[in-house]
Amino acid sequence: MILFSANAQNRDKLEALRVSFITKRIELTTAEAEKFWPIYNEYNDKLRAVKKNLKRHYHQYIDQSDDQAEQLYQLDLQSRQAEADLHKAYGEKIKAAIGVRKTIRLKIAEEDFRKEMIESIRERNDQ
C-alpha cells in the first residue's frame, strides 16, 4: 500500500508516486510519456486553478445577500462548465498523444490511485 502524509514536504513524493502509478497502470511507452505528461500536467494545473477560484469564493461566503449568493451560484455553474470544457479539450489532446484505449485506462488509473491514497490515509489514522 502507498503511504501518504498530507504535509507539504511530501507533495513531491506523492506526485512521483502518482506519475509512477499511472505510467505503469496504463503502460505508457517512453515516447508516449514524453507527449502525455506535459499535456496531463497542464490540464491538471488548469483544473486546479478553476477549483481553487471557486473554493476561495465559497470560503468568503458567510451569510451574504441574495444577490451575492446568486453571484456565487452563477460562478459555481461557470466553474462546472469550465471543468467540462477543460476535460473535453484536454481529453482530445491526451487521446491524440496516447490513443483512446489508454485514455480510458487513464480514467480508471486515476480513480484507482485516489482510492489507494484514501485507503493509505485510513490505515495511517487507524494506527
Image (cartoon, grey):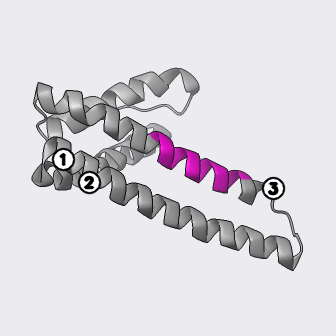
Is there CB contact under 8 Å for labels 2 and 1? yes
- Residue annotated with mark 2: 92
Measure how far apart labels 3 and 1 are at the Cα level. 40 Å
Query: What is the count of numbered marks?
Result: 3
Q: Main secondary structure of the magenta part?
A: helix
Q: Amino acid at mark 3?
A: Gln
Question: Residue 111: in sight, yes or no?
Answer: no
**Compared to 89, does 127 lie above or below?**
above
- Residue annotated with mark 3: 60
- Residue annotated with mark 1: 96
Q: Nearest to the eye among marks 2 and 3: give it.
A: 2
Q: Amino acid at mark 1?
A: Ala
Measure how far apart labels 2 and 1 are at the Cα level. 6 Å
- In the image, what residue occupies the spot 44% across and 23% down? 12
**Compared to 80, does 9 lie above or below?**
above
* Residue 86 percent location from the top left of the image: 42, 55
- In the image, what residue occupies the spot 14% across and 54% down? 100
Q: Secondary structure at mark 2?
A: helix
Q: Amino acid at mark 2?
A: Glu
The span shown in magenta is 45-56
Dot 3, how many residues are within 10 Å of its Cα: few (below 14), some (14-19), or many (20+)?
few
